[in-house]
Image: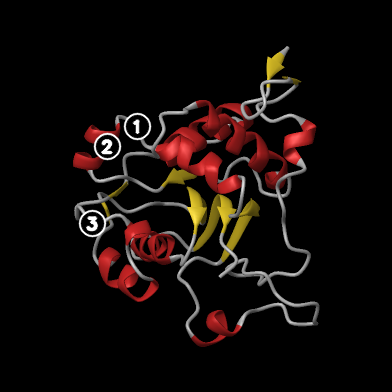
Amino acid sequence: MLRCTVCQSPAEQALCQDCHQLMIKPTYRCYQCGKPLPNTDATQCGECMTSPPEFDTVIYATLYQYPVDRWVHQLKFGQQLSAAQLMADSLIPLLSSIAVEVPLIPVPLHPRRLLLRGYNQAAMIAQSIAKAENRKLITDVLFRPKNTQMQAALRAKQRKNNVSGAFGCLKPLDADRILLVDDVLTTGQTLRACAKALKQNGVRQVTALVFARSRG
């Protein structure tokens, strides 16, 4: 029997049922970026109508709020690597309608940051999903030649400039659709930049797959 990553109680997966209930997902959300919407007939937020992201839709397990934000920080900055399995386990059930032939591509880190951190949290989540679902994992195409500032340290308006030109592809991709994996979506600028690079290199449809999404 496994133990819950969060509370250490016996569990069948990385997250027990009690802790799983701490994860909140909005009933109404934008079909493209996943932003929570009021209880209306709208299916798309105003931002996506006026400035649609390069990714086509987003799948996420929970909103980015307490205690989910702590789990993300524990993985990204606290060396709590078991949290990657927690996130993967939360996302796997959401992929039932997506063919296993659709590959996974994690958002890459710049080599310098990867060296300092020792691991790429997005890649760890993607690896767990790939193993569980027998999906192809592609890690040798999308890369990050620009060592940007950390997005979390910047204001929303600064984030777009920060990741402009930060991603590229080493070779074209012969893929109709891919799952672009990351731990959290806040303003979406990193995922936009990655999706743009992928679509410029042969990908037709990009589905962002993230554990948590901010309310804004």
What amino acid is labelled 3 in the image?
Thr
Q: CA distance from mark 3 to mark 1?
A: 17 Å
Disc number at residue 187? none
What amino acid is labelled 2 in the image?
Leu
What amino acid is labelled 1 in the image?
Tyr
Q: Is residue 157 above or below residue 115?
A: below
The answer to whether any part of residue 180 appears in the image is no
The answer to whether any part of residue 215 appears in the image is yes
Residue at 30 percent across and 45 percent down: it is 109
Determine which quarter of the picture holds residue 189. bottom left
Residue at 65 percent across and 27 percent down: it is 14
**Residue most toward the bottom?**
50
How many numbered badges does the structure rendering display?
Answer: 3
Of residue 153 and residue 115, the one placed in the foreground of this image is 153
Residue at 80 percent across and 77 percent down: it is 39
Horizontal side of 14 relative to 121 (left or right) equals right
Disc number at residue 119? 1
Disc number at residue 148? 3
Residue at 23 percent across and 34 percent down: it is 116
User: Residue 4: where, in percent of width, then height?
Assistant: 67, 24
Determine which quarter of the picture holds residue 115. top left
Label whose residue precedes the other's in the sequence (3 or 2): 2
**Residue most toward the top?**
1
Horizontal side of 44 relative to 191 (left or right) equals right
Badge 1 local density, few (<14 within 10 Å), some, or many (20+)? some
Q: CA distance from mark 2 to mark 1?
A: 6 Å
Instruction: Kindly identify which residue carries mark 2.
Output: 114
Q: Give the structural element (helix, strand or loop) at label 2.
A: helix
User: Residue 22: where, in percent of width, then height?
Assistant: 73, 44
